[in-house]
Image: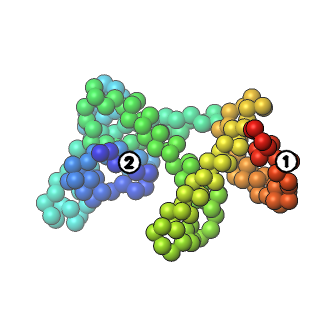
């Protein structure tokens, strides 16, 4: 198992407890957290160590070896450098570039969650249902709604010959919300989606 976390969530205790379960970790650390370079590695990463916090030190827990990976991600013409730490020390099996790519994939997986929780749902109480069965039904409905918006974005992008990733999810939701009243009063024969044989 590989546990990944975002910048600012790391701590010595989190790393120690993750390792105690037998899992591995790959986490981003903020720019202000410094690691001493103990040994440079051939793939550009380097070995260092995490110093225990006071409580851990008092419990006799020592320094934990870590591997630090610095990676640069370019977005909209701007380069952003970020640092990852991991206990996966074997650079042959786990090259720095591979780990950086997998960490980036984690970011990609968070985008749909943000679209659903923040922009599509957009209320303080994400799920209103009170029973397990209705909670599942409500979440399934939200997931279908998210999928429908993304499908419509794909259909809108194709004639314009642009990537659907260039379209704004929040902008698309606004367009759909404005279209709801007209759709509610439309007759089935006026909608291509509901036409016979489509």
Where residue 176 appears, x then y in whole percent? 76, 53
In the picture, measured across the screen, residue 24 lies left or right of residue 194, that is left
Above or below, 3 relative to 198: below
Please name the residue shown 49% across and 34% down the image.
Answer: 72
Where residue 42 appears, x then y in whole percent? 31, 24
Tag on residue 41? none
Q: Earlier in the sequence, mark 2 or mark 1?
A: 2
Where residue 101 appears, x then y in whole percent? 44, 34
Q: Which image quarter: residue 13?
A: bottom left
Where residue 92 appears, x then y in whole percent? 28, 26
Question: Tag 1: Cα neighbours inside 10 Å, few (<14), some, or many (≥20)?
Answer: few
Q: Which image quarter: residue 196?
A: top right
* On-image quarter of the C terminus: top right
Residue 178 visible in the snapshot: no
Label 1 element class: helix
Above or below, 43 relative to 180: above
Residue 88 vs residue 182, the one in the foreground = 182
Q: Does the residue at mark 2 contact the one at mark 1 (Cβ under 8 Å)? A: no
Question: Tag 2: Cα neighbours inside 10 Å, few (<14), some, or many (≥20)?
Answer: some
Label 2 element class: strand
Reading the image, the residue beneath label 2 is 4
Residue 121 vs residue 54, the one in the foreground = 121
Q: Furthest-bottom residue in view?
A: 130
User: Disc 2 and disc 1: Cα gap in Å?
Assistant: 50 Å
In the picture, measured across the screen, residue 27 lies left or right of residue 123, that is left
Above or below, 115 relative to 122: above
Please name the residue shown 78% across and 52% down the image.
Answer: 175
Reading the image, the residue beneath label 1 is 189
Color encoding of the figure: rainbow
């Amino acid at each position: 198992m590989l546990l990944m976390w975002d910048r600012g969530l790391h701590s010595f205790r989190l790393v120690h407890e993750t390792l105690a379960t037998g899992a591995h970790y790959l986490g981003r650390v903020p720019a202000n957290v410094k690691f001493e370079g103990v040994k440079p590695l051939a793939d550009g990463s380097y070995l260092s160590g995490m110093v225990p916090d006071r409580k851990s030190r008092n419990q006799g827990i020592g320094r934990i070896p870590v591997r630090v990976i610095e990676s640069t991600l370019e977005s909209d013409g701007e380069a952003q450098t970020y640092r990852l730490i991991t206990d996966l020390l074997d650079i042959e099996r786990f090259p720095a570039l591979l780990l950086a790519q997998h960490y980036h994939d984690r970011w990609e997986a968070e985008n749909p969650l943000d679209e659903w929780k923040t922009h599509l749902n957009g209320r303080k109480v994400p799920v209103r249902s009170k029973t397990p069965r209705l909670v599942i039904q409500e979440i399934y409905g939200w997931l279908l709604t998210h999928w429908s918006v993304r499908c419509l974005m794909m259909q809108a992008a194709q004639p314009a010959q642009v990537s659907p990733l260039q379209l704004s999810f929040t902008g698309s939701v606004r367009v759909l919300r404005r279209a709801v009243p007209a759709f509610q009063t439309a007759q089935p024969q006026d909608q291509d989606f509901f036409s016979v044989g489509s």
